[in-house]
Image: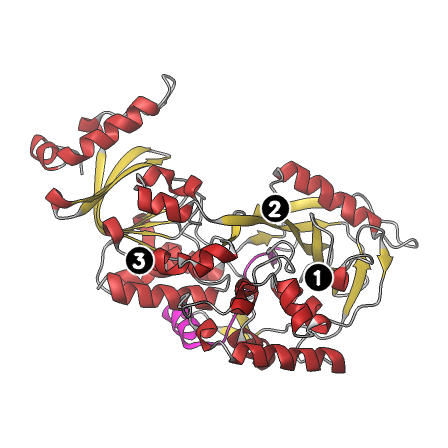
């Protein structure tokens, strides 16, 4: 719709928003903010971000008879579900999220789109360990479940015994006991030493790629991610796309949502919770076709909740004080050609680090794909690096592990995606002082709710289950 005089009067509270954003723009702004030409979109819910949680929320909200608009910065939905189509064979190469826990929320979501699932082959012991700093092979107990090594099995049993003490770790929400048990606030390395869990550290580390140094991470985050549900899920079997195309779900969602998604769009300003206007909120979005003004009854923010990401949303002091506490890591996923691979999986295990954990920044591992010349390679860092720095270091890492009897040309990065900011966490003191109670108290504050990995864990099935509960509690 276009703004008429009557609508202008009705939308008067948004004028200050538009004026503020316009004042911040340079004289070279290609799309001037002329209010009388501004398109206004009215919806029940504005969903910010079209990744895993945002797409699920949009589909479910429509099923619950709510109108939605999704604001997504990329040209497609999917978030961390990344797919590269090999131009020579047409085969999709998955280099992001591709497997799921076999739970009812997963089964129902895929069934909605009539997308068949199949058992995921997580591999066995067909792996090799290499120190990527030297290129030398080292001997490390194979990483898989159930473990074949007696020491790893015993350590895993002790770990599961510790998990059993804290049943709240199985909940999607951070519903922690008060006070939080001291063991959960220890650095994970100290927790490992205290409970003699060293033999299983490489197994845990392989499950938390992207967390930085897991030994320095607060134990709560490791145990909530690698909890009993996760362990049983790995042992009982995961599910994946029968088509081996991890873009299938999001292509189906794109088709269903249609014009309710604003692609390649970002929020440039917002005015939330305007009481005189029935608590409606206003969002100004920059899109390829110009600015659009969105009037929504509620907002659901699914992008990583860093202060930097949330600044356009007119944070109040309470919100800013909470979100400013988040720190995060950096995680990258790539498809690379021209790599010699002697096993289906090559893990980076350093010779001179505790428990042979990889030296970071660096490669976590190399994984075979359905295209022989293309490998899925994942990389992590605890500190910021530019994409070009990551790519250069990736290639340097890979050059060190070339087989002496194999002639291979220069490795080529054919697909690259940054998943940063990744794994948002706070300090142990903040956890003990009630951070997650304060975070949950923000749900519904100023007409805004939040979902995503920062509020639960980096696992699609858990994010969808968290989102499902949130929608039923706050949106219906």
- In the figure, 163 relative to 326: above or below? below
Neighbour class for label 3 at 10 Å: few (<14), some, many (≥20)? Answer: few
Q: Quadrant of the N terminus?
A: top left
User: Looking at the image, which residue is at 45% across and 44% down?
Assistant: 74
In three-dimensional space, the C-alpha distance between marks 2 and 3, rounded to whole angstroms, equals: 37 Å
| Stretch in magenta | 90-114
Determine the residue positioned at 72% across, 58% down.
366
Q: Is residue 414 magenta?
A: no
Q: Are marks 2 and 3 in contact (CB under 8 Å)?
A: no
Describe residue 83's horizontal placement relative to residue 134 as left or right.
left
Quadrant of the image occupied by residue 386: top right
The residue that label 1 is drawn on is: 368
Q: Locate residue 67, reporting x and y percent.
A: 23, 55
> Where is mark 2, residue-wise?
416
Q: Secondary structure at mark 1?
A: strand
Of the two numbered discs 1 and 3 in the rendering, the one whose residue sits closer to the viewer: 3
- For marks 1 and 3, give the CA distance: 44 Å
Mark 2 vs mark 3: give the one in front. Answer: 3
Q: Is residue 112 above or below residue 1?
A: below
Residue placed under numbered mark 3 in the picture: 441
């Amino acid at each position: 719709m276009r703004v008429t005089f009557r609508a202008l009067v009705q939308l008067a509270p948004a004028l200050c928003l538009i004026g503020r954003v316009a004042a911040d723009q340079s004289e070279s702004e290609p799309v001037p903010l002329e209010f009388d030409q501004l398109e206004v979109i009215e919806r029940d819910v504005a969903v910010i971000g079209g990744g895993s949680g945002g797409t699920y929320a949009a589909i479910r909200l429509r099923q619950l008879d709510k109108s939605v608009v999704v604001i997504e910065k990329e040209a497609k939905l999917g978030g961390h579900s990344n797919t590269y189509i090999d131009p020579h064979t047409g085969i999709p190469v998955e280099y992001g999220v591709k497997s799921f826990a076999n739970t009812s929320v997963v089964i129902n979501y895929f069934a909605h789109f009539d997308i068949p699932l199949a058992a995921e082959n997580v591999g066995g012991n067909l792996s090799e360990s290499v120190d990527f700093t030297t290129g030398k092979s080292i001997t490390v107990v194979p990483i898989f479940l159930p473990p074949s090594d007696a020491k790893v099995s015993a350590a895993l049993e002790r770990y599961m015994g510790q998990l059993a003490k804290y049943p709240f770790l199985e909940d999607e929400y951070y519903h922690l006991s008060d006070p939080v048990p001291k063991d959960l606030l220890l650095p994970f390395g100290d927790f490992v030493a205290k409970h003699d869990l060293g033999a299983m550290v490489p197994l845990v580390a392989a499950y938390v790629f992207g967390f930085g140094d897991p030994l320095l991470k607060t134990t709560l985050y490791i145990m909530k991610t690698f909890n009993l549900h996760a362990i049983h899920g790995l042992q009982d079997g995961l599910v994946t796309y029968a088509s081996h195309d991890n873009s299938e779900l999001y292509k189906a969602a794109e088709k269903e949502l249609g014009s309710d998604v604003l692609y390649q769009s970002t929020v440039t300003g917002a005015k939330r919770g305007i009481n005189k206007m029935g608590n409606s909120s206003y969002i100004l979005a920059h899109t390829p076709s110009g600015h659009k003004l969105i009037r929504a009854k509620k907002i659901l923010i699914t992008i990583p909740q860093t202060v930097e990401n949330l600044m356009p949303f007119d944070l109040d002091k309470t919100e800013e004080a909470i979100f400013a506490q988040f720190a995060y890591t950096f995680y990258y996923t790539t498809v690379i050609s021209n790599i010699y691979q002697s096993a289906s999986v090559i893990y980076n295990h350093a010779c001179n680090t505790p428990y042979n954990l990889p030296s970071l920044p660096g490669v976590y591992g190399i994984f075979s794909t359905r295209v022989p010349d293309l490998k899925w390679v994942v990389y992590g860092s605890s500190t910021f690096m530019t994409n070009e720095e990551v790519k250069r270091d990736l290639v340097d890492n890979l050059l060190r592990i070339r087989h002496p009897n194999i002639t291979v040309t220069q490795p080529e990065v054919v697909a690259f995606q940054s998943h940063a900011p990744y794994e948002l966490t706070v300090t142990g003191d903040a956890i003990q002082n009630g951070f997650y109670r304060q975070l949950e108290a923000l749900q519904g504050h100023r007409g805004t709710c939040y979902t995503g990995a920062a509020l639960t864990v980096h696992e699609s099935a858990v994010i969808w289950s968290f989102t499902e509960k949130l929608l039923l509690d706050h949106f219906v």
